[in-house]
Image (cartoon, helix red, strand yellow):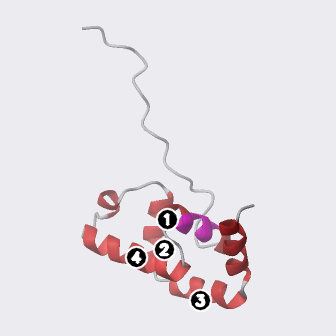
Amino acid sequence: MDILESDESALIARPKFREHAINCTTASSHRQVLQLVAHGDRNTQIATEVSEATVKVYLGGIFERLKVAGRAEAIAVGLRLGLLDPTSGPKAPEQAPTKWVTP
């Protein structure tokens, strides 16, 4: 376990942080964005009903509230706090063609 993991675990274990993080991310729009990030969606894919700039603002707010630096950390903390549904994992990558096309 490295320093980051132990610091993150200690932070998540604090009841006040946990309560604050859950309260701040209960807005359905923030949770939806976090869930879509966990699915592997890019900002442009998430921005179907709102602008990409709005998605970036939501992500910035999520990162700030969860005290993380990026998407991967937000997903890890979101899972640990129960903010994400662990049964709906990332989308499967598109399959490569099974046959080679000869020129």
Query: Label 1 amino acid?
Result: Gln
Q: Which residues are magenta?
A: 73-79
- Residue 62's place in the image compared with 14, above or below, is above
Q: Earlier in the sequence, mark 1 or mark 3?
A: 3
Quarter location, residue 76: bottom right
Give the class, few, some or many, for how many residues have Cα within 10 Å of label 1's Cα (few <14, many ≥20): many
- Tell me if 103 is positioned left or right of 35 in this view: left
Q: Which residue is mark 2?
A: 31
Contact (Cβ within 8 Å) of mark 2 with mark 1: yes
Identify the residue position indicated by label 3 in the image.
20
The answer to whether residue 50 is seen in the rendering is no
Which residue lies at the image location 45% right of the left edge and 54% below the top edge? Answer: 40
Compute the Cα span from label 2 to label 4: 13 Å
Quadrant for the N terminus in the image:
bottom right
Residue where numbered disc 4 is placed = 60
- State whether the magenta stretch is mostly helix, strand or loop: helix
Q: Nearer the viewer, residue 7 or 92?
A: 7
Numbered circles on residues, count: 4
Question: What is the spatial separation of the Cα atoms under label 3 and label 2, in whole angstroms?
Answer: 14 Å
Q: Residues within 10 Å of mark 4 (few under 14, many from 20)?
A: some
Q: Are marks 3 and 2 in contact (CB under 8 Å)?
A: no
Q: Mark 1 = which residue?
A: 35
Distance from Cα at disc 2 to Cα at disc 1 = 6 Å
Residue lying at 26% horizontally and 72% vertically, measured from the top left? 53
Tag 2 secondary structure:
helix
Residue nearest the observer in this picture, 92 or 1: 1
Q: CA distance from mark 4 to mark 1?
A: 15 Å
Who comes first in sequence, dot 3 or dot 2? 3
